[in-house]
Image (spheres, rainbow, N blue to C red):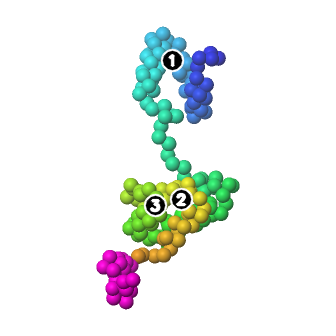
Amino acid sequence: MNKEINRDLVADLARLARRYPPEDWDAILRWIEDDTRRQQLSSLLCQLSIVSKRVTPPGKREKRPQSIGRLLEEMRSTEPAKAELLRDLHRRLLTRELLPTPASLREFIEIAGLESSNTQKREQATNQLIRQLASLQYDDIEKALEVASTGPRDLGKEYERWVALILGRNSGGRPPDKA
C-alpha cells in the first residue's frame, strides 16, 4: 500500500467495512469502475478534504475533564488514603449529607480558598470541587474539611465581638484598663 495514505484513515475504513455486508462494497466497486462516477467520487473526496480543514483536529479539541471515578481510581495506586477520603467526600456531597445547599457549597469553596464554580448545576460544582481538592496535599484537604465541619458561622456573635474590639471593650462590656 502507498505510504502516503494515512494508516488511521485506512483503519477507519476497515471499521466501516465491518459495518456493511460484502454486497454493499461490491456495489461500490462496480460503481467506481465507470469513469464518470469515479470522477464524482474524486470530487466528493476533494470536498471532504476541504471540510476536514475547517474542522478542529482531534488533538486540538478542548478535552473533557477526567471523570471523578477515573481520577480517584488512578489516585488510589499512589495515594490510597487521599483517594478514599475524596471518594467518601464525593459520595457525601452528592447525597447532600455534607454541604446540602448550593449556598453552603459555595461558602465552603470560598472559605477553603478554592476557585469558585461558575456552573449552576450542583453535581458539576461538586465535581469541580473534588478535582480542586485532588490537587492538594492530604493534610491541606483535611484542614479544608475541618472548616466545613465547624458548621455555619454565627454572624451575630461575630459582629458583636468585632464591635466590642473596635470600640475597645472587653467581654465584660467595660472599656479595657489602661496601663
Q: Earlier in the sequence, mark 1 or mark 3?
A: 1
157 or 5, which lies in front? Answer: 157
Spatial CA span between label 2 and label 3: 11 Å
Q: Residue furthest right?
A: 77
Q: Quadrant of the C terminus?
A: bottom left
Q: Quadrant of the N terminus?
A: top right
Q: In the picture, residue 48 is in which quadrant?
A: top left
Q: Residue 31, which numbered label?
A: 1
Residue 101 in the image, given as x and y percentages of width and height: 41, 69
Residue 161 in the image, given as x and y percentages of width and height: 36, 80
Q: Residue furthest top?
A: 35
Spatial CA span between label 1 and label 2: 59 Å
Seen in the picture, residue 92 relative to 178 is either above or below; the reply is above
Horizontal placement of 93 versus 155: left or right? right
Seen in the picture, residue 129 relative to 152 is either above or below; the reply is above
Dot 3 lies on which element? loop
Q: Amino acid at mark 2?
A: Leu
Q: Which residue is mark 2?
A: 133
Dot 2 lies on which element? helix
Q: Earlier in the sequence, mark 2 or mark 3?
A: 3
Q: Amino acid at mark 3?
A: Gly
Q: Which residues are magenta?
A: 154-179
Residue shown at 44%/65% (left/top)? 111
Q: Give the crowd class for mark 2: few <14, some 14-19, many >=20 residues within 10 Å.
A: many
> Would you say residue 176 sits in the magenta stretch?
yes
Q: Residue 147, which numbered label?
A: none
Q: Earlier in the sequence, mark 1 or mark 2?
A: 1
> Would you say residue 140 sits in the magenta stretch?
no
